[in-house]
Image: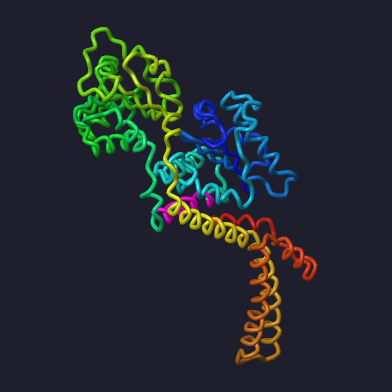
Amino acid sequence: MLLCVTASHKTASFELLERLSRTPDDVAPTLVGMTPCVQGAVVLATCNRFEAYVEMDEPVTAAGAIGVEAVIEAVESATGIPAAELDGAYAVHSGRRVAEHLFSVASGLESVVSGEGEIAGQVRRALTSARKDGTTSPELERLFQRASQAQRKVKNVTALGRAGRSLVRLALELADSRIADWAAERVLLVGTGAYAAVTLATLRERGAVNISVYSPSGRAEVFAAKHGIRPIAADEYARTAARSSLLITCTTATEPVLGPEHLQLPAAPAAVGCPVGAHSRLVVDLGMPRNVDPAVASLEGVALLDLETIRLHAPLEELQATDAARTVVREAAETFHVVGARQSVTPSVVAFRSHIFELLEREIDRARARGDEDGKVEQALRHLSGVLLHTPTVRAHELAAAGRADEFTAALSALYGIAPEAETSAADDAATA
């Protein structure tokens, strides 16, 4: 069975989400190694959510409860956050609800900004990371691959993507009230990842031209050369920060990379192109965990805009676009469930067909031995076997779609004394995946 344990901006505090996001890479390997009941795990950690997707061994009694307990223990082991602190901060989805939830997440329906585009890439990277760590499973592979397909369909057939805005765009829209002329701003971009590229493109759309980049991990020169901006070396960082009027941080660092010490140089001249208002400098923190020491907000002349503040100003959802997107997601989730159910009954169908074909070949051999030289008896037998197989096969898929695949397997056992072989089932699952 599939299980999802999710803590998001809807259930958990910003501070707890920040702590959960510090060491997400250790959770899935810890979880898979914790109990044989866990067949696979994929962890999705973004700036506004922390989710563990788990495939549990279906026959295990109380598999759902065991899975949730295992996730909490793995999170505690990997992040150091006591299980008691997680009480009430997460929700649990199981069975067919898991697909609809992930498809909604991948499509941006569960984001702070409905329809934001970054989450789709984060979902894909979560699966890639699980593959690298060897923690994924055939069913989780299918789940995440179908999530990407659902996201693309939502993007192509609804207006959600056009109505929704990314966190970067929303942050800069909120900054608009403080900035009179983007071209006059001295901008320092801290970070060189995917968010940094989106931020740079959005800054240029607004007219910013004086942009520098600093990378705590030493990748500023490569990023700057690719995008045509000025790189900042480590020994220039504090001086450049103090002279910048707009600073935007978006790194994956687990500790703050910008603090009061970077903005209080005695020799720092007044910033050129200061944002409108009482503040001479605006700091936008897009990092999770936070990249900026909150003490920066207490400095005179400095305004801090972080993800928690951005979340409070998120716009109302575009209802029509959202409704259309949710319809697409529900249909995709139902298809995922039906296909999965049919796959679950496939070993039994294969066993049944193999049994009938074995009987068929015996009768054909007998017919040949009795003089069926023109093959008419063989032809009739093959036609009859096809007719006999059709209705049970269709019925098997119908039962599977209704969650009653075990009834077909039980009927095979009762009527024919046959059962799907474990080896056949495993091979079929692998082929399906």
- Residue 101 vertical placement versus 296 (above, below): below
Q: Nearer the viewer, residue 423 or 30?
A: 30
Which residue is situated farthest in the top direction here? 266
Q: Main secondary structure of the magenta part?
A: helix
**Quadrant (top left, top right, bottom left, bottom right) of the C terminus:** bottom right
Viewer-closest of 114 and 409: 114
Q: Is residue 141 left or right of residue 153?
A: right
183 shown above or below 410: above
Asked if residue 217 can be seen in this view, the reply is yes
Instruction: Determine which quarter of the picture holds residue 429.
Output: bottom right
176 left or right of 398 in image? left
Q: Nearer the viewer, residue 182 or 101?
A: 182
In the depicted view, which residue is nearer to us: 16 or 339? 16
- In the rendered image, residue 250, in percent from the top left (x then y), is placed at 37, 29
Query: Residue 310 at x, y = what percent?
Result: 41, 32
> Can the viewer see residue 431 in this picture?
no
Residue depicted at x 23% and y 24%: 186
Scheme of image coloration: rainbow
Residue at (36%, 33%) from the top-left corner?
171
- Residue 262 drawn at (x, y percent): 32, 14
Residue sticking out furthest to the right: 414
Residue found at the far front of this picture: 277
Q: Quadrant of residue 223?
A: top left
Magenta segment: 142-155
Image check: 87 left or right of 233?
right
Residue 405 among magenta residues: no
Residue 73 x %, y %: 65, 30
